[in-house]
Amino acid sequence: MASDFWLIAGLGNPGKKYEGTRHNMGFMTADVLAERWSVNFADHKGLALLGRSVMNLDGRAVKFFLAKPLTYMNESGNAVSSIASYYQIEPDHIVVIHDDMDLEFGRIKVKAGGSAGGHNGIKSIDRSLGTPKYARVRMGVGHARRGANAHDNTVNWVLGGFGPDQRKQLPEFLADGADAAEEIIFHGLAKTQEKFNGR
């Protein structure tokens, strides 16, 4: 019997040294949702910080879990699939929020299915759930320099922080990401795509 709960997972890496880095966009957006809906996080099997709450929007109430995997990015799927199977949440009720280098900073795209785009957290979730058919809120962080050390540049880029201009824009960007996750739950993927993907 599938649960009527939704699961929103914000991806990132645990620990002080990763706080505020590009790769932790998912964590930061999850924190915005936690504040909005008074979610208190507790440990889920050492795999994730997990909280539950109810969203009230447009005269409807929806129960949801909010997760921040503690498995490090490359093993995000272990946390997401553990929560999903424990609470019987189907992939069509899962929303994953993550950083995306293919989008400029400040842009958001919403999709379900399709390629992982080289994102190790998404690859891990695809593998663990056995399907890519869950919703994704892709938070643009822009691209590292190409060139001889492209791989190292990429790693340093996603694990790097934001410049002063971007830091100023970050609260609004994170709020938009949180809005996108709510929109998917309340209005479905197609409507959310119309609203965010064209920006």
Image (cartoon, grey):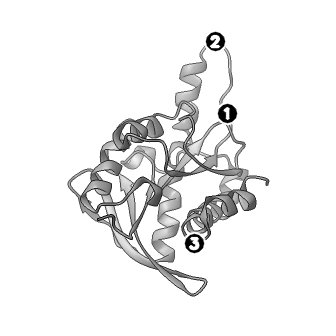
Q: CA gap, disc 1 to disc 2? A: 15 Å
Is 63 above or below relative to 42? below
Task: Classify mark 2: residues with Cα within 10 Å, few (<14), some (14-19) or many (20+).
Answer: few
Position in image of residue 127 (x %, y %):
38, 36
> Quick check: 181 left or right of 13?
right
Residue 26, position as x, y percentages in the image: 50, 53
Label 3 belongs to which residue?
A: 186
Where is residue 56 shown, x and y percent of the image?
A: 52, 83
The answer to whether residue 38 shows anywhere in this view is no
**Amino acid on which the number 2 mark rests in the picture:** Ala
Instruction: Say which of 170 and 181 sits in front.
Output: 181
Mark sitting on residue 143:
1
The residue indicated by pointer 2 is 148
| Marks 3, 1: nearer the viewer | 3
- Disc 1 or 2, which lies upstream in sequence? 1
- Front-lying residue, 199 or 159: 199
Residue positioned most to the left: 45
Task: Kindly report the distance in space between the C-alpha atoms of the residues bearing marks 2 and 3.
Answer: 45 Å
- Which circle's residue, 2 or 3, is located before the other in the chain? 2
Question: Furthest-top residue in view?
Answer: 148
Circle 1 SS class? loop
Locate the N terminus by quadrant. Answer: bottom left
Which residue is drawn at the image coordinates 65% and 30% (left, top)? 144
In the image, is 92 to the left or to the right of 154?
left
Is residue 103 visible from the viewing direction of this image? yes
Above or below residue 136? Residue 144 is above
Neighbourhood count class around disc 1 (C-alpha, 10 Å): few under 14, some 14–19, many 20 upward: some
Q: In this view, does 140 lie above or below 187?
A: above
